[in-house]
Amino acid sequence: MKRYRSLLLLLLLDVVLINVAFGLAYYLRYIAQWIVPVGEQFFAPYSEYFLMQAAFTGLMLFFLYADGAYTSQRGGSWLNEVYRIISATTTAGVILLVAVFLLLPLVYSRLMIIWVIVLTVSLLSVARLILRWVRAQLRRRGIGVARVLIVGAGELGRAVVRTIAARADLGYRVVGFIDDNPSKSELGRLKNLGALERVEEILREEPVDEVIITLPWMYQRKIAALVRACEAAGVRVRIAPDVFQLSLSRLDVDDIGGIPLIGIKEARISRVGRIMKRVLDIVIAIVVLTVMALPMALVAWLIRLDSPGPALFRQTRVGERGRTFTIYKFRSMREGAEEELEHLWEYNEASGPLFKIRNDPRQTRLGRLLRRTSFDELPQFFNVLRGEMSVVGPRPALPHEVEQYLPWQRQRLEVQPGITGLSQVSGRSDLTFDESCLLDIYYIENWSLALDLTIMLRTIPRVIFGNGAY
């Protein structure tokens, strides 16, 4: 019901903007007389255009609907919306031009119709952009978010969860998952709400707006039963296609003599993408190290004054494809802190193989400030220059952590680790280990330079406010 109400409001907004565009076009043509002046013998009052305006509005709504502009889609790009608007507007405008040429006298301005087309496209496109921004901000605050139940906790289910976690703008919040396998008791912070046969009971007990089924294709009968149960409960149901448990972006379609063949692309960044990413890394690392050279030297001096020991902390980490390297950071703990770790495990606040505690007693006075501002990570730009790390990528793991990885979690080792990453800008230490892995794998599967730049920009407020840093 909410979906239909929002689409009705969008339709009413389009009606208003289409008519505003028509009014502005009349003003530019007859009042301002922009570009080409209008002779007195060709002047037409606005009332003469009422019928034409109504016809254009009707045609616009029809073609916008036909082009799918009023179909509710989460995650579609703004450019796709603009394309639909241009298609509908040009079609309606051409029909109007033809009608004017064939049926109406020359007093009716053809140039005005061109203005109508240009202004309609402009106003509707800008309105869609503003609506997308407002909707994204509201969804990030939990407003207008659809509550989703995931059916199945396999690889496909994890793919859906990590996409939802990475794309807050989609407006989904997972309330939990159901799976017949009792060993799959949790997925990140999500709990197993029970077996598939409990779906009707769960839909009565839990506030669910939508069910996404991620079961393998051989469960056809169970899927059909689940669909019927959701429809009976009045809950929208969708099925994620189990095509090798991959997204369409990872399929390589070809044919041999008309016989379709589907290949599977590796979940890795392409060679060209790696070159572009490496060039960007080098440029950013050089700029940061040049600009921050004096502040880094000052911090190194203050660390030596604050506590005994070296200014730089060196540690072995696991990089791309399991290769180890030495990571550099400003020392934020007292010397010998690693030897004290075994006595602190009972206070661990992190999940999985990670170790994190707030107000770690091993931190120095200056170290707390360095951690809070992420200033301790600046020396890692030397690792970037050496080709051991990237500016953006998964968190570099410790060897003993990697030894405890589940098979699906090892996918995060397919790219170079990063100083910042999707998991860091989506919650940092406040995320569970499974949630961080899901976000890292989403990043690898959906990498682009635009995504890297977006993560870098999102890192800035995270560093300034210190969200999730400890």
Image: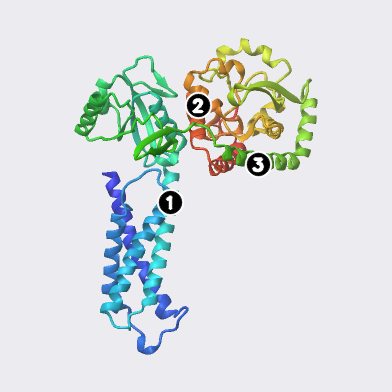
Question: Residue 434, how many percent across, how many down?
Answer: 48, 24
Query: Residue 388, position in %: x, y?
Result: 66, 29
Instruction: Indicate the colouring scheme.
Output: rainbow
Q: How crowded is mark 1: few (under 14 residues within 10 Å), some or many (20 or more)?
A: some
Q: Name the residue under label 2.
A: 437
Circle on res. 78: 1
For image coordinates 44% across by 45% down, the residue present is 136
- The answer to whether residue 26 is visible is no
Say if 439 sits above or below 364 in the image. Answer: below
Instruction: Name the residue nearer the viewer: 103 or 341.
Output: 103
Question: Residue at coordinates 70% horizontally, 40% vertically from top-left?
Answer: 288
Q: Is 326 above or below relative to 29?
A: above
Res. 207 in view = yes
Q: Residue 363: where, in percent of width, then height?
A: 68, 22
Horizontal side of residue 33 vs 399, given as left or right: left
Is disc 1 placed on a helix, strand or loop?
A: helix
Amino acid bearing label 1: Trp
Residue 279 - label: 3
